[in-house]
Amino acid sequence: MEQHISELDTLRFGFRVAKINTFDDLPFEIIRKFKENGVKLIISRVLTSDIKLINQMEEAGFRLKDVQVTYNLNLGEKSLPANTDDIYHYRGFEPNDITSIVRIASESFRNYGHYSNIEKNELAKTKEIYEDWAKRCCVNKSVSDHIIVAEINREVAGFLSFKILTEVQAQYAVGLLGAVDKNHRNGGVFQNINLAGLYWAYKEGMKRVEHNVLITNFPVNKTYMSLGFQIIRSEATFHCWLEN
């Protein structure tokens, strides 16, 4: 079970945290094994279509924390719309952008996602979690391969990070963390950042692009639908606290 220990979350919270998304044993048995390994919190993300497993998890003490949908767009199957934005400049990441990107992430992701729904309120460090993720996207190539930045008057207005993965000898891009500064929202910046991401992925020979979105994040869901993305799966995130 040691391979499921999340070193990052364990360091962040000060106790052992495990992440497991595939259950080879019944949830009760998984819990027993993790207890023996000193785990205090289990985080799992499973397909919402697997109702049998979800019911077993609920019976074992897992609690729902968020639901996400995954959007996919196959590049080359349709022509990409033109970016007609002549106000903002869309470019690749530069080291001087880090401070602005971390600030935007901090402001945008307060009380967002499954970490913000941790029952132990004193542990809900959502702000710090997204700040850390944003910084790691900027400085660690094992986290993110590319970041697109929206800029106006030498000011970062938004960003979107990507990771390149491989399947069946073809590469595809997965959107990671992205947000728009509160002073630049509702003007199409996020949609155009995503469009710039599609241009980049196509130029780099990617087969497709996918993004995960909380189902309650209605503006972002609308953005991906308007760009022609289609939902290919949905997943639910659960937490289970263990009393050792």
Image (cartoon, helix red, strand yellow):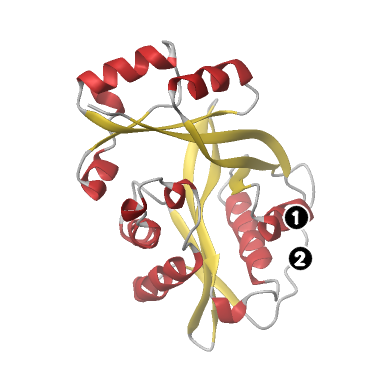
> Which mark is nearer the camera, 1 or 2?
1
Mark 2 Cα-neighbour bin, 10 Å: few <14, some 14–19, many ≥20: few
Please name the residue shown 70% across and 71% down the image: 188
Instruction: Please provide percent x and percent y for residue 38.
Output: 20, 27
Residue 221 or residue 67, whichever sits in front: 67
The C terminus, quarter of image:
top left
Please name the residue shown 25% across and 49% down the image: 12
Would residue 74 be found to the left or right of residue 200 on screen? right
Instruction: Please provide percent x and percent y for residue 48.
Output: 62, 28
| Image-quadrant location for residue 80 | bottom right
Would residue 226 be found to the left or right of residue 206 on screen? right
Amino acid on which the number 1 mark rests in the picture: Leu
Please name the residue shown 39% across and 62% down the image: 127
Q: Which residue is mark 2?
A: 82
For the residues labelled 1 and 2, say whether their Cβ atoms are less than 8 Å apart.
no
Measure the C-alpha gap from mark 1 to mark 2.
Answer: 11 Å
Residue 14 or residue 131, whichever sits in front: 14
Vertically, is 214 above or below 83? above
Would residue 14 be found to the left or right of residue 53 on screen? left
Please name the residue shown 42% across and 48% down the image: 115
Badge count: 2
Vertically, is 213 above or below 51? below
Instruction: Please provide percent x and percent y for residue 122.
Output: 31, 55
Q: Earlier in the sequence, mark 1 or mark 2?
A: 2
Which disc number belongs to residue 227? 1
